[in-house]
Structure formats: structure tokens, C-alpha cells
Image: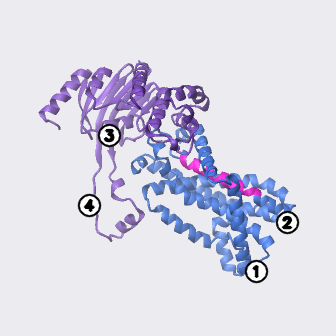
Chain colours: A blue, B purple
Amino acid sequence: MLDYLNGIWNARHFWRHLAQAELRYKFRRSKLGIIWTMIYPLLLTAMMAVVFGSLFKQPVREFAPYVFSGLLTWEFLVSSVIGGCQSLLVSEAYIKQYKHPFAIYPLKTNMVNIYTFLLALPGLALWILFIRPANLLVGLLAMPLSILLIFMLGWPIVLVVSFLNLKYRDFGQVSGLLMQLIWYGSPVFYDPKMLNSPTLIAVLELNPVTHILNLVRAPILYGQFPALMDYAFVLATMLFFYLLALFMIWRSEKTLIYYF
Amino acid sequence: MSNYYIRIRNAELAYPATTYNALTLKEEVFKFFRIGKPTKLLYDIHAIKNMTLDINEGERLGIIGRNGAGKSSLLKAIAGIYPLQSGSIETSGKIRSMFELSLGFEFEASGRENILYRGLLLGESPESVREKIDEIIAFAELGEFIDYPIKAYSAGMLVRLAFSISTTIRGDILLMDEILAAGDAGFQVKAQKRMEELINNAKIIVLVSHDLAAVEKICNRAIYISSGEIVADGKASDVVREYRNSMNAGVVK
């Protein structure tokens, strides 16, 4: 275990540079570059806020940042669960040349994901600055921890799905379906309060995604620190995925090379 | 006691058949419920069998044998890439493996950036790569192309770059799958000189090759492997002779 962590630390220059390379490549391909990453969720938000805002009869001014903050965080989860599937597969050439701990490749993917997440945050901050400037202070205080938790959560998730996808190549499709299902059961583009159903609200309370979303929403939208319950749920989810990740490393890291 | 060594004890390496048998979740589920036609089960491929081998400082070991005898598997096991089922491989010294050289480039990144990534992959620090980068570029003779993305390179240029990186970043234990030759006639002469230099500087060399003359020339010891077992071990010229004889006689276990 200590050896494994040591191996990750020793390879730090390597995965850091790989993440940089991937980001640079990602932004080099489009003319708008980084701007595009910031604009895309904004446009998507505008679309969804108008459609669902009128459907649920919500004022766009308030509803848009709600959808925006949801989409940002949701996109991070999607790129972890669906995008993360490819994490090991695309690193095959490296893996076959030099023995580094496999966990560094999910770590690299996770760094790219969190960076993309961070890039979209200023857009949200700007919006809030106009409608709720008072929230900015709490946001600045609470967000670092929220971001850290989201980052820490992403790593084991990517590791688990990339290990699974290497063994079962159709896992990608399954994870796509799974995320679609979770999407409907998560308050990304609707507010549980709009549902008028105590049972549904109770069910949503049990969905960890609700609490992950709250890590971002509570400080930015409502100017509050996330509730203890939110932290508890996120930490429990983290613990679950870290244990699962450790189990998979212990169980299959040794034979994984043969699945390429 | 020498500082550099490779110690292999009762090594067993098998490619698990599960990797060929069940590849999808769908198949796994179907198998569980016993639906769908049963597929023919494949068996583990036993690549290395109960092998014990010591390689010490100063030795240049050639590994010879027919295709599929387990030569490359052994090399990759020493490099730590293929795990053993049982037994152990202990090494002391920095290992430099030279196989699949042209793999593992970031095609969107420039040659210069790729030198850095490859160096870091091999366990160098950013500083030490930066020290060597000019030497690598000069040797690869890429000129202004070094700042172009790799995808713009010709096959020959890519091989030259790969060769230059892999031979500039040194190690104590050199693992080679076939002697490398790269590029056009002019470059090959340079490459050969570089290889000789590399071979002379390495503390231990393990070379897998079908080029028996090269094994005789470079190596001071050789092993002959057949179906994952060492058949002969000794002076390179003796082992090569034995291998040739068994090939001629058509006796292959």
C-alpha cells in the first residue's frame, strides 16, 4: 500500500505533464479554445433555463444559475463515469512500456476533469455577482473545500470505471445508461421543491448526487455553508469508492495488463 | 557481491485464459444464467515455467529460442510489466527497456514536448530531461521539425526520435527486444555506433534476438529457451551452436 502510494508520488512529474498535454490538446483543437469550455455550459444553461423555466414556471433570472451550477457539477460526474472508462485504455502504450501504478492514469483524467470544472466556475460567479453579490463571500470561503472534495471523489470513480471497462469492454454502454437513469433521479435541472411530493423529496435526499450538487449550490446560490448532511453523504460516497478502488487495485491490478 | 543484478526464482508466468473467454458484461451475465450457446473455453498460456536464473553485473545475456518460446515474456517480466503468478524477480539497478519504442507518443504534441513526456515516463525528472533535450534533438536530426506536432512526422522521423530518446536516457540494466536499427542508411551507421556505446556502458544487458550472429558478437552468455523452460545456459557461442543443432535436427521439445 505504502509502496503503491510511493509509486504514484514518484511518477508525479509524468502524470502532471500528461494532464497538461491533454488539456493543451483539448483547447488547441478549437479556435475559441478555453473560452469555448466557459461558454458551452452557459449556452446549455440558457437553453435549459428557458425551456424548463417556462415548463416549471420559474423566473429565468433565479432558475438559470440553479441549472448552471447543477450542470457544471453533473458534467464533472459524467466525464468521470463515462469519459473515465477510457482512462486506462488510451494509456495502453505507456502502460506497456513502463511499470507505473495504474492509478496514475485515472488521476490524470481526474485532473483534466476538475480543470474543466474549474474553468466554468467564473461564469457562475459572474452571474451571482449580479443577482446575489452577498453570496460571494461565503462562496469564497466554502468553495475551496467543496472543490477539494469533488476532486477527491472523482479519482476513485474514474479508477473503478476504467478498471471495469478494461475487463468488460461493454461497460461504457452500461455506464451511459446508468448515468441517464441517475440524471432523472437527480435535481440537476429541477428543484425538488417544485415537485410538491414529500416522497420524491425524501428519495432525492438519499441520492448522493443531490448532496454533491449542494456542495456547490449552498454557498453560491444561497450564501450558506453546505449542510453537515451534505458533507456526510459526500464523505460516505467517497469512502465507498475509495474502498472499491482499493479492492480493485488489490484484486486485479496484477492481471489487468493482459486485458489490453 | 555486485551492485547490479537480476535474480529470478521459480518464476511462473501464464497469460490467464479469462482474458480471452469472457470479454463483456453481457457474456458474463449470460453465462451466469446459462443462456446462449456455450463458447469453447480457452486455456491459460503458460509462457514461463518454474524458471530460476541469476544475471550478474558485467553479463550480457542473449536469449534465443523459437517463436513463442517465452523470450519476450521473460523480458517483460524482468521489466515488471508482466506480473508473475508465483516466484519472484528481484532486480537492482535502473532498468531501461527498449521495446515498443514508437508507441506512447502524444500525436498532437510537438517533438520537443514528447521528449519530455517520454523522459518522465521513464522515470526521469523534468530537470534531467531538460539537460538532455538538446542532445536528443541533435542526434535525431529533426531540425525545425522538432517543434511540429508528431502527427506531421514521417515514419522514419518518428523512429529516429524514439531511438534518440531511448538511447540518450541511460540505465544500468538494458533490456532489448531485437537489436534496434533505425532510419536511412546514414542514420543507421550512427545508430549502430550509439548502440555499441550503450552496450558498452550498461552494467547488465539482456538481449532477445533471432539474429544469432549478433548474439554471438554482443553477448558473453546465452540461454536457449523452449516452451518457457531453459534448455541450455552457458557461453554464447556454445548455446548458439546447440540451438542451431537442435533446429537442424528438427528436435524441438
Is B142 on the left-hand or right-hand side of B126?
A: left
> Magenta part mainly helix, strand or loop?
helix
Q: Which residue is mark 4?
A: B40
B211 inside magenta stretch: no
- Report in which chain the residue with disc 3 lies: B
Q: Is residue A180 visible?
A: yes
SS label for mark 4 = loop
Residue matched to label 3: B12
Which of the two discs, 4 and 3, sits closer to the camera? Answer: 4
Instruction: Determine the secondary structure under disc 1.
Output: loop
Q: CA distance from mark 4 to mark 1?
A: 60 Å
Q: Are marks 4 and 1 in contact (CB under 8 Å)?
A: no
For the residue marked with disc 1, what is the amino acid? Lys
Q: Which residues are magenta?
A: A105-122
Amino acid bearing label 4: Lys
Label 2 SS: helix
